[in-house]
Image (cartoon, rainbow, N blue to C red):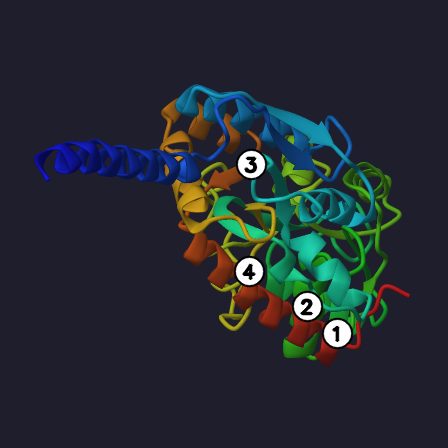
Amino acid sequence: MPGALKTILPRRRALLLGAAAALAASALPVPASEVGKLYVGFAAGGATDTLARLIAPALSSELGQTFIVENVPGASGMLAAKAVERSTPRQPAYVLYPTMTMLGKVLAGQPSELDKLTPISLLYEQFTLVVVNPQVPGLENVRTLQDLLQVAKAKPGLTYGPMGVGSTGHLTMEWLNSLAGVKMQAVPYKGGAPAMADLLGGHIGVLIADSTVVAPHLNSGKVRAIAVNYPQRMASLPDVPTIQEQGFKEIAGVPWVVLAGPPGMPQQQAAALAKALDKVLAQPELVQAMRAQNVEPRSSSPKEATQLMQGDLALWSRIIKDNHITNN
């Protein structure tokens, strides 16, 4: 019996050690021998790509593993999401998933398919600004949202430019139209550069866009910011009041980007990566660099990221339905 006991104990110890090692390995965000891919659904050089390339090296340093950015542009980011959907939990593939990608399916009348990704953490939120060109006739004295709405009531058919059909800016302005009882007409653009060019050229008088598009032009004197859609004012534009401050407390929801992984990703793995991102997004140098790109760093748990995505999906789906918005 003693001999048998000596044989059983080492074997049991080996099994326990093996189980512990397997558990530890499953909690790793990326297998140590692998290179993690951060997919971006937009072309290199854009805002999402720039921010991904700020986050990737910081995350690599935090975890001692390599993360690289890979661009898969097209279909409002859905092609990049598909690349991760097709991967497996054992493959280190993740996607920077923005609000507009989630809403693309809704606009097409299709299921959102959020269940085909594993939300890991919120990465950042974006400020949306309403701006006017005061050189456009009728907008010379517009300095507040109420000023703009008065012009819209007096001038039916006043046009504004959102960044694409179904963008959060588009949905916010249509929500505002409904609440204020006006009808500003959307002229959607496929990108920030052509929209800003038309605003500066006076072809449109009003633009709602992410601050990454607008901010570089605010000191030109040709563009005037009249409202920001965010829970609080921007530190870089302290004199620009929020939409909520200007009488529309019902309006909520801001653009965000979430890091998501493949379907069926183990909870321990997602939680470990979220904790690493929490540390990364608190680094003063990274915070400063991201705010210089006019976004607000935000981290979260996988559960919080899931709740955010599901909550905003319900919110914006209602706005899309109530205002009969389609991408056709």
- Residue at point 80%, 53% (across, down): 164
Calculate the distance from the C-alpha at mark 3 to the C-alpha at mark 4: 22 Å
| Residue where numbered disc 3 is placed | 294
Q: Amino acid at mark 3?
A: Asn
Q: Amino acid at mark 2?
A: Leu
What secondary structure is marked by label 2? helix
Q: Amino acid at mark 1?
A: Lys
Q: Residues within 10 Å of mark 1 (few under 14, many from 20)?
A: some
Q: Earlier in the sequence, mark 4 or mark 1?
A: 1
Labelled disc at residue 149: 2
Calculate the distance from the C-alpha at mark 2 to the C-alpha at mark 1: 6 Å
Quarter-of-image position of residue 183: bottom right
Left/right of residue 205 with respect to residue 114 in the rendered view:
right
CB atoms at circles 2 and 1 under 8 Å apart? yes
- Residue 191 higher or lower than 100, as above or below: above
Labelled disc at residue 83: none
| Residue where numbered disc 4 is placed | 309
